[in-house]
């Protein structure tokens, strides 16, 4: 790939942001599937980085769930709010059956009837979530047929 193509793609990615309203859209010519692949690739670069609740957005030595999603999306030019509850208000709402690679997936506490958001992950496609929590740190886990599916609250498409 030549530098002209690189610069063009960088400008396109720099132009993409997730506005604070409900209608985050991608008005550039970069297909959202390409950006989703970049999101997953960037996220996987952090596999194994430890989880720390309240981790600063300024570090990549530890992440909490929302600092991880914020960092990964920022690296491909999509700006997200800092915490999972704020992130759950950005972009287009999607159901569990409509999830696509690169979508944000939001969860409530296990066994809770409350719809309070307590966790965010990235849908990596093929029934996988890319996220960080507890001992594994940044990892991929299965989604359907697991406690994660039972805790599902909503999905959001921001790319």
Image (cartoon, rainbow, N blue to C red):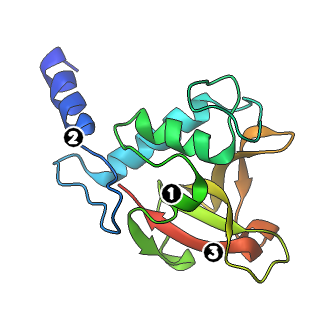
The N terminus: image quadrant: top left
Q: Quadrant of the C terminus?
A: bottom left
Q: Earlier in the sequence, mark 2 or mark 1?
A: 2
Count numbered badges in the picture.
Answer: 3
Q: Which mark is residue 87?
A: 1
Residue 23, percent from left and from top: 30, 67
Secondary structure under tag 3 reads strand
Q: Do residues under tags 3 and 1 come within 8 Å of each other at their CB atoms?
A: no
Asked whether, in this view, residue 6 is left or right of residue 56, the answer is left
Measure how far apart labels 2 and 1 are at the Cα level: 19 Å
In this rendered view, identify the residue nearer to me: 124 or 136: 136
SS at badge 2: loop
Task: Relative to 32, say whether 134 is above or below.
Answer: above
Q: Nearer the viewer, mark 3 or mark 1?
A: 1
Q: Residue 20: image x %, image y %?
A: 36, 58
Q: Residue furthest top?
A: 3
Q: Which residue appears at 38% of the width and 43% of the height?
A: 79
Q: Which mark is residue 97?
A: none
Residue labelled with disc 2: 15
Q: Earlier in the sequence, mark 3 or mark 1?
A: 1
Nearest to the eye among marks 2 and 1: give it: 1
Q: Which residue is mark 3?
A: 153
Q: Nearer the viewer, residue 117 or 95?
A: 117
Categorize mark 2 by other alpha carbons within 10 Å: few (<14), some (14-19), many (20+). few
State whether residue 89 is above or below residue 132.
below
Callout 1: SS: helix
Q: Residue at x 36, y 45 (%)?
A: 35
Dot 3 crowding, Cα within 10 Å, few <14, some 14–19, many 20+:
many
Q: State yes or no: discs 3 and 2 in contact (Cβ < 8 Å).
A: no
């Amino acid at each position: 790939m030549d530098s002209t193509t690189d610069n063009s793609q960088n400008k396109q990615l720099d132009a993409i942001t997730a506005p604070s309203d409900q209608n985050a859209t991608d008005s550039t010519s970069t297909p959202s599937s390409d950006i989703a692949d970049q999101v997953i690739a960037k996220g996987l670069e952090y596999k194994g980085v430890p989880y720390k609740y309240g981790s600063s957005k300024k570090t990549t030595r530890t992440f909490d769930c929302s600092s991880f999603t914020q960092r990964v999306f920022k690296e491909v030019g999509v700006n997200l709010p800092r915490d999972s509850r704020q992130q759950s208000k950005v972009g287009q709402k999607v159901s569990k059956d409509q999830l696509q690679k690169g979508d944000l997936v939001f969860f409530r506490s296990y066994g809770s009837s409350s719809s309070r958001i307590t966790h965010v992950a990235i849908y990596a496609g093929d029934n996988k979530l890319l996220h960080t929590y507890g001992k594994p740190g940044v990892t991929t886990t299965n989604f359907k047929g697991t406690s994660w599916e039972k805790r599902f609250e909503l999905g959001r498409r921001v790319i």
